[in-house]
Image: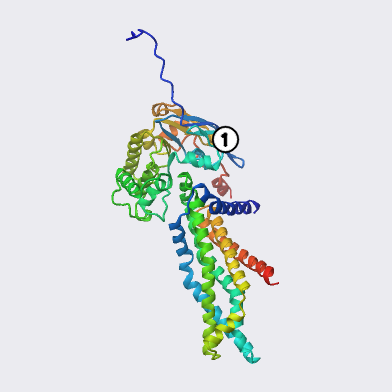
Amino acid sequence: MTKGFGAYVLLCAGVLYWLFIAPFRGKTYRLSQIFSQMVRIGVHAVPMAALTTLTIGLVLAMQSAAQLQSLGASQYVPGLVASSLVRELAPLIVAIIVIGRSGSAVTAELGTMKVSEEIDALEVMAVPPMSYLILPRFLAMILMMPVLTVFGIYVGMFGGWLITHFNLNMSTSYYISHALEYIKPRDIAVCLSKSLVFGFLIVTISCHTGMNVRGGAEGVGLATTRSVVLSLFAVFIANAFVTALFYF
Amino acid sequence: MPEAEPNKPTSPAPKPDPLIEVDSLVRKFGAQTVLNGISFKVYPGDTFVIMGGSGCGKSTLLRHLIGAETPTSGSIKVLGQELTTASPRQLEEIRRQFGMLFQSGALLQSLTVAENVALPLVEHAQLDPGLIDLVVKMKLEQVGLTGHGDKKPSEISGGMKKRVALARALVLDPPLIFSDEPTAGLDPVMTAVIDDLTQKLTQKIGATVVVVTHDMASIFRIASRIIMLGTGDRQGQIVIEGSPEEVKNSNDPMVQQFIKGTSDGPIPYRSEGDNYSDMLLAN
């Protein structure tokens, strides 16, 4: 356990070295690989993130409308949907989608490369796996998580609008102006910070678990499950921590 | 013009410095000693074969030679540099000077055949992309794979994968090539093809080859020097070191059993345990 955590810390340190120090020593970022990973990690996750955040927006609006309408306070629905999405739900839901879709894929891919000696081959060819495999995935995740989160907020807000517009007969301009009233710049900053923290945790845990696969196909399967479980734990704990730090 | 001195004894040419020097190498995994006091030298131009039965530690030895494992004790010098105390950066520098052919080929599945062969060039040679493309085509032609550059490794056969891996190992014309079971899982014709290609291409660039294998036909076809690692009572020790002829003529029963491929002899094929047949009969 301690050894595993030590190796995880070393991986994080290695990533930071390749990110901030290596470029000053003549090493360049592999832009084509970063873009290709951005597509795989981020763009391909768009449909899932859209569907999930849309339904969350719909459900939030329906639940709050049902309660607030009885109190004659349905004008608060846009604000409730917006603040719930920005403060908590969008970063968290997007992180869960990315863990299930992209984090697990990263672990499975690296794990398969490990058991089929591809990572050994890279090392023997003096191509550091940290720079060739991990850094492009890291940068792709760090760049795409905030983008997906912002996208998730928009889609979730659209879900809320569908209910308020067609069920509560609220105008679009009323919905937008009331929603924006409840979102402070600090909320946006915390939301983006959360998505960065979640992205960091997901990609480092996924890469660490994948790079340390042992055994064959069974090892890859176990590592993928482990990666998903650890990432979920880490994200939920980090979410509680950041929320407590800024809102409590 | 000075007169030649008659009858002066000519001293033998001094031996070149070894490319690989292994001294008293020991590797233990827990209580199990896998490599036990291994010492040998590989000289330039050798095709040095490490042979032995399953579980004798030959692949473990190879992993030590490429710096993928750290020994429990002993010294490993490759191309004049000590591997056991090398920093990651020094190890990277040493590794740039040798090629490695893995048992499975270890081609990157996400890249095409041509991209796999080009990888060491792209990473380490400051060459124009057009030139890299030309070198890759030349290497693929040398291993008989012209026109297969755009295929993915999953679209080619096992023998073709081995040839692609050979082309990749040779693409930087390294002075030293390591090869782990290069003919495992191949039919006899493809085995001969891989052997011939390895010999022809390495001789062409003057490379030294270290091969780990248990394929006897292959061993006597390519080897200039052989070591055999023992199993059982002599686990992880060098049983014999010599030329192919010396190995063939050895009186060591373990060596003869391995060469002849018989089940009776000092090489154990199973671990000792209870005699379950007798226990069944007793009931």
Is A40 drawn above or below residue B136 in the view shown? below
User: Residue B98 falls in which quadrant of the image?
Assistant: top left
Mark 1 element type: strand
Is A96 drawn above or below residue B105 in the view shown? below
Is A236 drawn above or below residue A123 in the view shown? below
Quadrant where the N terminus of chain B sits is top left
Chain name for mark 1: B
Residue B163 vs residue A49: left or right? left
The location of residue A113, given as percent across then percent down, is 47, 53
The location of residue B160, given as percent across then percent down, is 34, 48
User: Residue B37 falls in which quadrant of the image?
Assistant: top right
The location of residue B211, given as percent across then percent down, is 42, 37
Q: How is the image coloured?
A: rainbow
Q: Residue at x 41, y 27 (%)?
A: B243
Residue A183 vs residue B171: left or right? right
Q: Is residue B80 visible?
A: yes
User: Residue B32 falls in which quadrant of the image?
Assistant: top right
The location of residue B55, given as percent across then percent down, is 50, 41
Q: Is residue A107 visible?
A: no
**Nearer to me, A170 or A49:** A170
Mark 1 burial class by Cα count in 10 Å: few <14, some 14-19, many 20+: many
The type of residue carrying mark 1 is Val
Q: Residue at x 30, y 43 (%)?
A: B142
Residue placed under numbered mark 1 in the picture = B26
Is A82 drawn above or below residue B216 in the view shown? below
**Nearer to me, B39 or A126:** A126
Q: How many marks?
A: 1
